[in-house]
Amino acid sequence: MWIMERLFQIAIDGPAAAGKSTVAKIVAEKLGFVYIDTGAMYRSLTYKALKTGTDLSSGKELKDLLDQTEIQLQHSDGGQRVIVDGEDVSEPIRYQDVTSHVSLVSSFPEVRSEMVRRQRKLARSSNVVMDGRDIGTRVLPQAQVKIFLRASVDERASRRFKEEKQKGMHPSLEALKEAIALRDKKDMERDASPLVKADDAIELDTTSLSIEEVVRAILQIVKERSPR
Ligand code: DC
């Protein structure tokens, strides 16, 4: 790793299923940086809210719940584990009921402010690759590298389809397309920190690129922006 005056931050934003977490994990591993999946934090709160019967239309109730919730992102050989109040929720936070409610939960400004505070704190102690929707615009506006990943809805749905089939699930391509398009719409149209490309982010359309090609492109950008 380089000797740096200030910690190095790589922000990766983009719509649902654009490959952010796959790419971010590999980039972090190659650079020896810590990977922070901010979507997992919003999913964790959504999971706990569903479990406790919290009113998902109340930003205040969700914020109160978040204040009593410890979310830990642990790094293990098999990837990242997500621990909520001591319980490993890495799998249930990917289930459909969480996925379909997370855009609502993440739309409340009071929830977002607290999440942003926690995310910035995580980025204070190590070099990070952080992925999400508002990392380059709000969480880490000073990040040395900002990437905005895009891919067509068809391509993203077909990637999810393959992933889910591999896991032994029985997905419907049409349903995945609809769900992705709906989540894009909600994430882009919310008032609080909507999904938008930062002016200084580099846009990569991954529709016809392999994971390796995207990783290579990001590492090249990091190299160009690194202190010599
Ligand atoms: O990256 P993901 O699909 O796991 O994120 C789940 C949801 O969380 C996403 O639909 C919107 C929200 N989110 C957000 O609002 N801001 C972030 N920084 C990360 C995720």
Image (tube, rainbow, N blue to C red):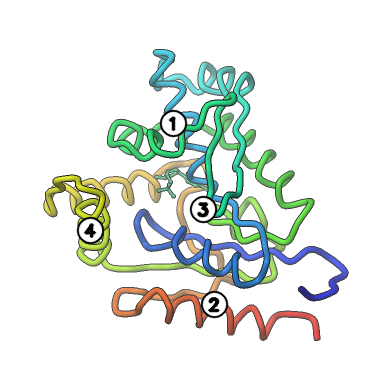
SS at mark 4 in the image: helix
Q: CA distance from mark 1 to mark 2?
A: 31 Å
Disc number placed over residue 105 in the picture, else none: 1
Mark count: 4
Disc number placed over residue 79 in the picture, else none: 3
> Disc 2 vs disc 3: which is toward the camera?
3
Q: CA distance from mark 4 to mark 2?
A: 23 Å
Residue 120 picture location, percent across and down: 70, 47
Q: Earlier in the sequence, mark 2 or mark 3?
A: 3
Vertical relation: 91 (above or below) 78:
above
* Residue wearing tag 2: 218
Could you say which quadrant of the image residue 145 lies in? bottom right
Viewer-proximal residue, 134 or 95? 95
* Residue wearing tag 4: 157
Q: Earlier in the sequence, mark 1 or mark 4?
A: 1
Q: Earlier in the sequence, mark 1 or mark 2?
A: 1
Q: Earlier in the sequence, mark 3 or mark 4?
A: 3
Q: Is residue 116 left or right of residue 209?
A: right
Quadrant location, the N terminus: bottom right
Does the beta carbon at disc 1 come under 8 Å from ligand 1?
Answer: yes
Pointer 4 local density, CA inside 10 Å: few below 14, some 14–19, many at least 20 = many
